[in-house]
Amino acid sequence: MALLWLMSFAGNVFAEDVPKIPIVDCHVHLWDISRPEGTGWIAKDNSILYRSFLPEHHQPIAKANDVSVVVIIQAGQSLPDNQWNLDITAHDKTLYKGIVGNLSPVIGTDGFEPLFAKLCQDERYVGYRLSGRYQETLTDAFFHDLELTAEKGRTVDFLLDKYTLDDVSEIARRVPKLKIILDHFGNLQWDGRPLDPEWVRKMHAVAAHPNVYCKVSALYGRVKKQPAPQDMVFYKPILDLVFECFGEDRLVYGSDWPVSETSGDYASVVRLTRAYFDAKGRAVLTKVLHTNAIRFYGIAEPALGNKP
Protein backbone atom coordinates (compact mmCIF):
# COMPACT_ATOMS: atom_id res chain seq x y z
CA MET A 1 0.00 0.00 0.00
CA ALA A 2 2.83 2.40 0.89
CA LEU A 3 4.55 1.62 -2.40
CA LEU A 4 1.38 2.35 -4.35
CA TRP A 5 0.96 5.66 -2.53
CA LEU A 6 4.60 6.58 -3.24
CA MET A 7 4.21 5.76 -6.95
CA SER A 8 1.02 7.83 -7.12
CA PHE A 9 2.69 10.76 -5.34
CA ALA A 10 5.70 10.61 -7.62
CA GLY A 11 3.49 10.48 -10.68
CA ASN A 12 1.63 13.60 -9.56
CA VAL A 13 4.88 15.46 -8.91
CA PHE A 14 6.27 14.54 -12.31
CA ALA A 15 2.98 15.48 -14.03
CA GLU A 16 2.98 18.89 -12.37
CA ASP A 17 6.64 19.36 -13.30
CA VAL A 18 5.98 18.78 -17.01
CA PRO A 19 5.67 22.20 -18.70
CA LYS A 20 2.30 22.90 -20.24
CA ILE A 21 2.02 23.11 -24.00
CA PRO A 22 1.16 26.70 -25.03
CA ILE A 23 -1.81 26.16 -27.30
CA VAL A 24 -2.01 27.72 -30.74
CA ASP A 25 -5.71 27.95 -31.54
CA CYS A 26 -6.16 28.22 -35.29
CA HIS A 27 -9.91 28.63 -35.49
CA VAL A 28 -11.51 31.44 -33.50
CA HIS A 29 -14.23 33.74 -34.79
CA LEU A 30 -15.02 37.30 -33.77
CA TRP A 31 -18.06 39.22 -34.93
CA ASP A 32 -20.18 42.25 -34.21
CA ILE A 33 -23.88 41.82 -34.94
CA SER A 34 -24.16 45.50 -35.77
CA ARG A 35 -21.94 45.12 -38.84
CA PRO A 36 -23.93 45.06 -42.09
CA GLU A 37 -22.89 41.65 -43.51
CA GLY A 38 -21.12 39.81 -40.74
CA THR A 39 -23.82 37.67 -39.13
CA GLY A 40 -26.37 36.76 -41.78
CA TRP A 41 -25.65 33.07 -41.17
CA ILE A 42 -26.71 33.27 -37.50
CA ALA A 43 -30.43 32.99 -36.81
CA LYS A 44 -31.80 35.86 -34.74
CA ASP A 45 -33.52 33.40 -32.42
CA ASN A 46 -30.20 31.71 -31.56
CA SER A 47 -29.93 32.72 -27.92
CA ILE A 48 -26.29 31.60 -27.65
CA LEU A 49 -24.71 32.99 -30.82
CA TYR A 50 -26.82 35.97 -31.84
CA ARG A 51 -24.74 38.56 -30.01
CA SER A 52 -21.36 40.17 -30.52
CA PHE A 53 -18.20 38.21 -29.71
CA LEU A 54 -15.22 40.55 -29.46
CA PRO A 55 -11.66 40.33 -28.10
CA GLU A 56 -12.85 41.52 -24.71
CA HIS A 57 -14.99 38.39 -24.48
CA HIS A 58 -12.37 36.03 -25.89
CA GLN A 59 -9.11 37.11 -24.23
CA PRO A 60 -10.00 35.95 -20.68
CA ILE A 61 -10.99 32.54 -22.05
CA ALA A 62 -7.72 32.22 -23.97
CA LYS A 63 -5.69 33.12 -20.88
CA ALA A 64 -7.59 30.67 -18.67
CA ASN A 65 -6.91 27.80 -21.10
CA ASP A 66 -3.17 28.30 -21.79
CA VAL A 67 -3.76 29.64 -25.31
CA SER A 68 -0.67 31.60 -26.33
CA VAL A 69 -1.45 32.36 -29.99
CA VAL A 70 -4.72 32.72 -31.89
CA VAL A 71 -5.49 32.68 -35.60
CA ILE A 72 -8.77 34.48 -36.25
CA ILE A 73 -10.92 33.04 -39.03
CA GLN A 74 -13.32 35.51 -40.58
CA ALA A 75 -16.97 34.67 -39.94
CA GLY A 76 -18.85 35.27 -43.17
CA GLN A 77 -17.82 36.49 -46.61
CA SER A 78 -18.01 40.27 -46.25
CA LEU A 79 -15.01 41.86 -47.96
CA PRO A 80 -14.78 44.82 -45.52
CA ASP A 81 -14.57 42.34 -42.64
CA ASN A 82 -11.08 41.32 -43.80
CA GLN A 83 -9.76 44.66 -42.59
CA TRP A 84 -12.13 44.75 -39.63
CA ASN A 85 -10.64 41.55 -38.24
CA LEU A 86 -7.15 43.04 -38.55
CA ASP A 87 -8.24 46.26 -36.87
CA ILE A 88 -10.24 44.73 -34.02
CA THR A 89 -7.25 42.59 -32.94
CA ALA A 90 -4.45 45.13 -33.49
CA HIS A 91 -4.34 46.04 -29.79
CA ASP A 92 -2.88 42.61 -28.89
CA LYS A 93 -0.61 41.35 -31.64
CA THR A 94 1.11 39.01 -29.18
CA LEU A 95 -2.05 36.92 -28.87
CA TYR A 96 -3.72 37.59 -32.22
CA LYS A 97 -0.80 36.77 -34.50
CA GLY A 98 -2.76 35.54 -37.49
CA ILE A 99 -5.83 36.68 -39.41
CA VAL A 100 -7.46 34.52 -42.07
CA GLY A 101 -9.87 36.69 -44.03
CA ASN A 102 -12.36 35.67 -46.70
CA LEU A 103 -11.90 36.52 -50.38
CA SER A 104 -14.54 34.19 -51.79
CA PRO A 105 -16.42 36.91 -53.72
CA VAL A 106 -13.36 38.24 -55.58
CA ILE A 107 -11.00 35.36 -56.24
CA GLY A 108 -10.67 34.85 -59.97
CA THR A 109 -11.77 38.44 -60.69
CA ASP A 110 -10.03 41.78 -61.27
CA GLY A 111 -10.90 42.72 -57.69
CA PHE A 112 -8.70 40.07 -56.09
CA GLU A 113 -5.16 41.30 -56.64
CA PRO A 114 -5.46 44.91 -55.38
CA LEU A 115 -7.41 43.89 -52.26
CA PHE A 116 -5.09 40.97 -51.51
CA ALA A 117 -2.00 43.17 -51.92
CA LYS A 118 -3.44 45.77 -49.53
CA LEU A 119 -4.32 43.21 -46.88
CA CYS A 120 -0.90 41.56 -47.13
CA GLN A 121 0.72 44.83 -46.07
CA ASP A 122 -0.13 43.60 -42.58
CA GLU A 123 2.07 40.58 -41.87
CA ARG A 124 -0.65 39.18 -39.62
CA TYR A 125 -2.84 38.60 -42.68
CA VAL A 126 -1.66 35.03 -43.10
CA GLY A 127 -4.22 33.96 -45.67
CA TYR A 128 -7.88 33.80 -46.57
CA ARG A 129 -10.76 31.40 -46.52
CA LEU A 130 -12.83 30.15 -49.43
CA SER A 131 -16.26 29.30 -48.09
CA GLY A 132 -18.47 30.46 -50.93
CA ARG A 133 -18.23 29.78 -54.64
CA TYR A 134 -19.10 32.56 -57.08
CA GLN A 135 -17.94 30.85 -60.30
CA GLU A 136 -19.12 27.53 -61.64
CA THR A 137 -15.71 26.35 -62.86
CA LEU A 138 -12.14 26.68 -61.61
CA THR A 139 -10.96 29.22 -64.16
CA ASP A 140 -7.44 30.18 -65.25
CA ALA A 141 -7.95 33.47 -63.42
CA PHE A 142 -8.85 31.53 -60.26
CA PHE A 143 -5.63 29.52 -60.47
CA HIS A 144 -3.63 32.67 -61.24
CA ASP A 145 -4.81 34.15 -57.93
CA LEU A 146 -3.92 30.96 -56.09
CA GLU A 147 -0.44 31.03 -57.63
CA LEU A 148 -0.08 34.62 -56.44
CA THR A 149 -1.20 33.54 -52.97
CA ALA A 150 1.50 30.86 -52.90
CA GLU A 151 4.15 33.32 -54.10
CA LYS A 152 3.20 35.67 -51.25
CA GLY A 153 3.56 32.83 -48.76
CA ARG A 154 -0.09 33.06 -47.74
CA THR A 155 -2.45 30.17 -47.07
CA VAL A 156 -5.95 29.08 -48.07
CA ASP A 157 -8.55 27.62 -45.69
CA PHE A 158 -11.35 25.67 -47.36
CA LEU A 159 -14.76 25.34 -45.77
CA LEU A 160 -16.15 22.74 -48.10
CA ASP A 161 -19.65 22.96 -49.47
CA LYS A 162 -19.75 24.44 -52.94
CA TYR A 163 -16.07 23.50 -53.20
CA THR A 164 -15.53 19.75 -52.91
CA LEU A 165 -12.76 17.38 -51.89
CA ASP A 166 -12.23 16.70 -55.60
CA ASP A 167 -11.76 20.44 -56.18
CA VAL A 168 -9.20 20.67 -53.40
CA SER A 169 -7.30 17.69 -54.81
CA GLU A 170 -7.17 19.38 -58.21
CA ILE A 171 -6.04 22.69 -56.69
CA ALA A 172 -3.36 20.99 -54.61
CA ARG A 173 -2.08 19.20 -57.71
CA ARG A 174 -1.99 22.29 -59.91
CA VAL A 175 -0.57 24.65 -57.24
CA PRO A 176 1.77 22.42 -55.23
CA LYS A 177 3.44 25.34 -53.44
CA LEU A 178 0.13 26.58 -52.04
CA LYS A 179 -0.49 25.68 -48.40
CA ILE A 180 -4.08 24.45 -48.07
CA ILE A 181 -6.00 23.45 -44.97
CA LEU A 182 -9.39 21.74 -44.67
CA ASP A 183 -11.54 23.31 -41.99
CA HIS A 184 -13.61 21.07 -39.73
CA PHE A 185 -12.54 17.68 -41.13
CA GLY A 186 -13.59 18.71 -44.63
CA ASN A 187 -16.89 20.05 -43.19
CA LEU A 188 -18.15 16.56 -42.52
CA GLN A 189 -21.33 16.17 -40.49
CA TRP A 190 -21.92 12.93 -38.67
CA ASP A 191 -24.33 11.18 -36.36
CA GLY A 192 -22.22 8.34 -35.05
CA ARG A 193 -22.96 5.99 -37.93
CA PRO A 194 -20.16 4.48 -40.08
CA LEU A 195 -18.44 7.00 -42.34
CA ASP A 196 -19.37 7.02 -46.02
CA PRO A 197 -16.76 4.86 -47.83
CA GLU A 198 -16.69 7.18 -50.85
CA TRP A 199 -16.02 10.19 -48.62
CA VAL A 200 -13.29 8.23 -46.84
CA ARG A 201 -11.69 7.44 -50.20
CA LYS A 202 -11.71 11.10 -51.18
CA MET A 203 -10.16 12.13 -47.87
CA HIS A 204 -7.31 9.72 -48.51
CA ALA A 205 -6.94 11.13 -52.03
CA VAL A 206 -6.74 14.75 -50.92
CA ALA A 207 -4.36 13.87 -48.09
CA ALA A 208 -2.00 12.30 -50.64
CA HIS A 209 -1.01 15.86 -51.57
CA PRO A 210 1.65 16.96 -49.06
CA ASN A 211 0.58 20.62 -49.22
CA VAL A 212 -2.86 19.83 -47.75
CA TYR A 213 -3.43 19.94 -43.98
CA CYS A 214 -6.55 19.28 -41.90
CA LYS A 215 -7.98 21.07 -38.88
CA VAL A 216 -9.05 19.18 -35.81
CA SER A 217 -11.74 21.79 -35.34
CA ALA A 218 -15.48 22.10 -34.73
CA LEU A 219 -15.77 18.65 -33.18
CA TYR A 220 -19.06 19.72 -31.64
CA GLY A 221 -20.19 21.58 -34.73
CA ARG A 222 -19.87 18.58 -37.04
CA VAL A 223 -22.51 16.64 -35.10
CA LYS A 224 -25.96 16.72 -36.68
CA LYS A 225 -27.91 16.63 -33.41
CA GLN A 226 -27.10 19.44 -31.01
CA PRO A 227 -25.98 19.78 -28.30
CA ALA A 228 -23.20 17.40 -29.25
CA PRO A 229 -21.85 14.65 -26.97
CA GLN A 230 -18.63 15.24 -25.03
CA ASP A 231 -17.55 11.61 -25.05
CA MET A 232 -14.35 11.14 -27.07
CA VAL A 233 -15.41 7.64 -28.15
CA PHE A 234 -18.16 9.21 -30.27
CA TYR A 235 -15.54 11.17 -32.28
CA LYS A 236 -12.92 8.43 -32.49
CA PRO A 237 -13.81 7.16 -36.00
CA ILE A 238 -13.28 10.57 -37.64
CA LEU A 239 -10.19 11.29 -35.54
CA ASP A 240 -8.76 7.89 -36.46
CA LEU A 241 -9.40 8.62 -40.12
CA VAL A 242 -7.73 12.03 -40.23
CA PHE A 243 -4.79 10.76 -38.22
CA GLU A 244 -4.41 7.89 -40.68
CA CYS A 245 -4.70 10.28 -43.65
CA PHE A 246 -2.68 13.30 -42.52
CA GLY A 247 -0.44 11.87 -39.80
CA GLU A 248 1.00 13.76 -36.88
CA ASP A 249 2.60 16.52 -38.96
CA ARG A 250 -0.43 17.88 -40.86
CA LEU A 251 -3.13 18.10 -38.21
CA VAL A 252 -3.82 21.46 -36.57
CA TYR A 253 -6.01 22.29 -33.56
CA GLY A 254 -8.85 24.80 -33.73
CA SER A 255 -11.57 25.39 -31.16
CA ASP A 256 -14.24 26.96 -33.39
CA TRP A 257 -15.05 29.34 -30.56
CA PRO A 258 -17.63 30.79 -30.01
CA VAL A 259 -19.67 28.42 -32.20
CA SER A 260 -18.48 25.65 -29.87
CA GLU A 261 -20.41 27.32 -27.03
CA THR A 262 -23.55 25.70 -28.41
CA SER A 263 -22.41 22.38 -26.90
CA GLY A 264 -19.78 23.16 -24.28
CA ASP A 265 -17.32 25.65 -22.85
CA TYR A 266 -13.80 26.19 -24.17
CA ALA A 267 -12.16 23.91 -21.60
CA SER A 268 -14.33 21.00 -22.72
CA VAL A 269 -13.09 21.40 -26.32
CA VAL A 270 -9.48 21.19 -25.15
CA ARG A 271 -10.24 18.18 -22.94
CA LEU A 272 -11.94 16.39 -25.82
CA THR A 273 -8.99 17.00 -28.15
CA ARG A 274 -6.47 15.96 -25.51
CA ALA A 275 -8.44 12.81 -24.71
CA TYR A 276 -7.58 11.52 -28.16
CA PHE A 277 -4.07 12.86 -28.78
CA ASP A 278 -2.69 12.28 -25.28
CA ALA A 279 -2.71 8.58 -26.15
CA LYS A 280 -0.39 9.29 -29.10
CA GLY A 281 2.30 10.72 -26.82
CA ARG A 282 3.40 14.19 -25.80
CA ALA A 283 5.41 14.76 -28.99
CA VAL A 284 2.31 14.22 -31.15
CA LEU A 285 0.12 16.31 -28.85
CA THR A 286 2.64 19.16 -29.05
CA LYS A 287 2.55 19.07 -32.84
CA VAL A 288 -1.24 19.16 -33.01
CA LEU A 289 -1.72 21.85 -30.36
CA HIS A 290 1.28 23.99 -31.26
CA THR A 291 4.04 23.21 -33.75
CA ASN A 292 2.04 22.31 -36.87
CA ALA A 293 0.09 25.56 -36.73
CA ILE A 294 3.26 27.63 -36.44
CA ARG A 295 4.67 25.91 -39.51
CA PHE A 296 1.52 26.03 -41.60
CA TYR A 297 0.56 29.65 -41.04
CA GLY A 298 4.15 30.90 -40.80
CA ILE A 299 3.54 32.83 -37.60
CA ALA A 300 6.13 33.81 -35.03
CA GLU A 301 7.08 31.04 -32.65
CA PRO A 302 6.01 31.55 -29.01
CA ALA A 303 8.17 30.07 -26.30
CA LEU A 304 7.64 26.36 -25.69
CA GLY A 305 7.98 24.80 -22.28
CA ASN A 306 7.14 27.79 -20.10
CA LYS A 307 4.77 27.34 -17.26
CA PRO A 308 1.97 29.88 -17.23
Image (cartoon, rainbow, N blue to C red):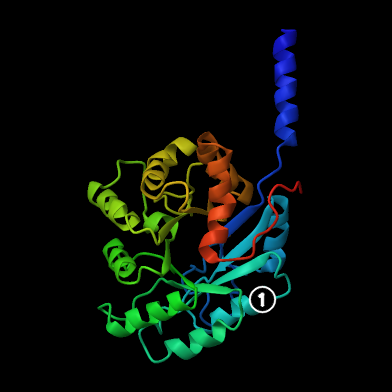
Residue 72 falls left or right of residue 10: left
In percent of the image, x 68 and y 67: which residue is there?
55
Q: Quadrant of residue 158?
A: bottom left
Give the class, few, some or many, for how many residues have Cα within 10 Å of label 1's Cα (few <14, many ≥20): some
Residue 19 falls left or right of residue 141: right
Q: Quadrant of residue 52?
A: bottom right
Residue 234 falls left or right of residue 303: left
Residue 177 seen in the figure = yes
Which quadrant, please, contains the N terminus? top right
Q: Determine the residue located farthest toward the left in the rendered image.
A: 198
In the foreground, 169 or 295 = 295
Residue 153 lies, in percent from the top left, at 49, 73
In this rendering, the count of numbered labels is 1
Residue 53 seen in the figure = no
Q: Check the image and report above or below for 260 versus 140.
A: above
Q: Determine the residue located farthest toward the top in the rendered image.
A: 1
Residue 2 falls left or right of residue 198: right
In the foreground, 111 or 80 = 111
Residue 65 lies, in percent from the top left, at 68, 50
Residue 117 lies, in percent from the top left, at 52, 86
In percent of the image, x 38 and y 40: which residue is there?
237
Q: Amino acid at mark 1?
A: Ile
Q: Secondary structure at mark 1?
A: helix
In percent of the image, x 48 and y 50: which residue is there?
220
Residue annotated with mark 1:
88
Residue 252 lies, in percent from the top left, at 50, 54
Q: Check the image and report above or below for 10 versus 306.
A: above
